[in-house]
Image: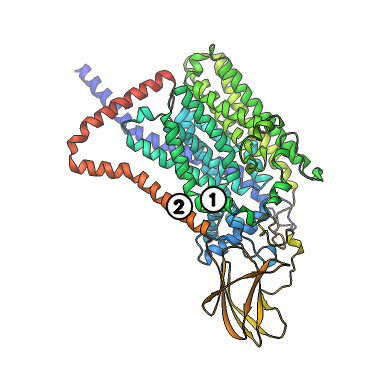
Amino acid sequence: MKKKRKTQTTKSTADAGAKLGPANERRTKLLIVLLCIGLSALAVVPFFFMGRSRRIDAVLELRMPTTHDMFLHYDQMRSFYKGLSAGDLYPRWEEDTNRGFGAPTMSYYPPGIYYVTSAFYAVTRDWLRTLLDAHLLIMIAAAGAVYIYAKRAMGRAPAIAVMAAYIFLPYHTLDMYHRGAMAELLVFVWMPLMLLFGEELMKVPSLATREKSLVLSIAGLAAIYGAFLWSHPPTAYQFTLGFGVYVLVLAVWRREWKGLVTVGLAMTLGIGLAAVYLLPAAIEQNLIHREYIAETWPYHKTYIFVHDLYKNSDVHRGFFKLLDAVWITGTAVIALGAIILLGLKRQLLSVAQSLNQRVTLWIILGALASFMMTSASMPIGKLIPRIEIGVFTWRMLSITTLVVALLAGAFAKAAIESAARRSRSNLLLFAALSALIIIGGAGFSAIAVARPMGDAAAFEPEPEHLNWATIPSSAPANPTELPDDVPPAELATEENGEVVVEEWKPQHRVMRASLKTDDELWIRTFNFPGWVAAVDGQEVPIKGSEELGSIEIKLGAGTHRVTLDFVETKARRTFRIVSLCSLAALIALAAMPFVRRKSGSRADPASDEAPARQIAKSEVKAVAGDASTGSKV
């Protein structure tokens, strides 16, 4: 009887534990989500209460310090929202820039970030609050993305260490606190997810019977890469170079060449998703003064320790020194990881076995990025097609930031395994290294990145928005030479009649002109491919002003209704179709496994039993293999 009662007690305890298990799991996940939000808020929110304000009572007033790029983003996000409000799904023309002459800004600048800000502004109706919400969302998304990837690679506890390091490492915070580089902040979301889906596709043989995982991984990598290109093509190109090396080395190690094909297919589909923006920008780049960027920021003069950019470099000397310090510390951590986790792998094999392959790949990626930021890489860089797309070599600090954060997790994982093996010396070593990266990175960000911005002037919008980079090639290269007292539309001959503007939207204008004699209508808008004019419903040719590059239309005597619309060129229309087809292919690809599974189960439920058993068996083998060989995802 006693033995039976003990058995029942044990069973009831097990049942209770089973009931508490899912609850504990949900509680743990909730705590991790709250930790992600809390750490992200700690990194982001102080920025919006910094900067010297003119108001005495502005201690708790929402504001932000002046940064390098925020003037540009502040004006462009408002212009973009104005275009969306006018009914344009993809507003390409920025109306209120260059003293009203406008610019085809969003045909060349990635619009992804402005869809995000427009969504927040539609709710908040406050641009500063919009910026706070957008930055916080981006940081949370980046932290969540790197946690998902790291958890897959190392487990939950090391993934938390990676997440904390990723949030607080100095280049990540510097992008916001000093540069105001909103679009570039989005890349921190996409990089770890590209590694996640890329690694999934590089283990195709083990997924031969798991079509669902294969096609979803292709769809996932395509969607992430497309979003990357919509967000920030310069960093996307730089990361693509490193990612290509990453999967190529992985293919050589695993002798898996089919995976390269699936990765290439996914990335091609991703390019298709971004084609409506990316490819017309490449084809039509001669239509603007593209030399402005190349002459202002020559790529091969932006190397770490070089920074040969501006005539008066003293203005940015402190910023350049900060970049150098971030490079030095990041490269040192990567070298330390190579020495300890790889160089001593024979002594630490029992501890670091599960991370050897991934750590090696991460270190290769980080070392490559660090090297390409130095002038020693120039001979190689000049052989890489269009490498100047990156504009600044030091943008690759985003890649080393990802690698350093992952190494923090690798050290944490090694510490956990050392504890399990009761190796006190290794436990202390690895735990100290992981803590050094996290705490040291956070301290660096707090002292060298965030604190100086408390004394910076609070941001105030510029009185006028000038966009030097996207001025049409037929217009003056210097927007300050443009007149600022020209009406939206006028006749060439004064007192020959009158012009009334009935509607003036970013990409659609309506004017009514009454003329005594034949004349020309001058419109304060740069003449650029895509503008189409109609007089009384009939399309008419547009003439560009030789002096200003603005639009001129010939009109006969009488009263006329003139419309001006910015429509798609052949290239824009063609690649819009490509993007729509790519989107349809992505949706079909993602839905395919679910549709087949549903139709298969309706046809013959029993027919799935054998394959299901085979899949379960292969999954058990894969898990066993991961446990013995180190989770080679």
For badge 1, the amino acid type reads: Leu
Instruction: Choose top left, top right, bottom left or bottom right for residue 592.
Output: top left
On the picture, is 251 further left or further right than 543? left
Instruction: Choose top left, top right, bottom left or bottom right for residue 188.
Output: top right
Q: Residues within 10 Å of mark 2 (few under 14, many from 20)?
A: some
Q: Residue at x 59, y 51 (%)?
A: 132
- The outermost residue toward the top is 347
Q: Are marks 2 and 1 in contact (CB under 8 Å)?
A: yes
Image location of residue 141, percent across then percent down? 51, 43
Q: Which residue is mark 2?
A: 578
First in sequence: mark 2 or mark 1? 1
Q: Residue at x 65, y 31 (%)?
A: 380
Q: Nearer the viewer, residue 208 or 567?
A: 567
Q: Residue at x 71, y 81 (%)?
A: 493
Q: Which residue is mark 1?
A: 279
For badge 2, the amino acid type reads: Val
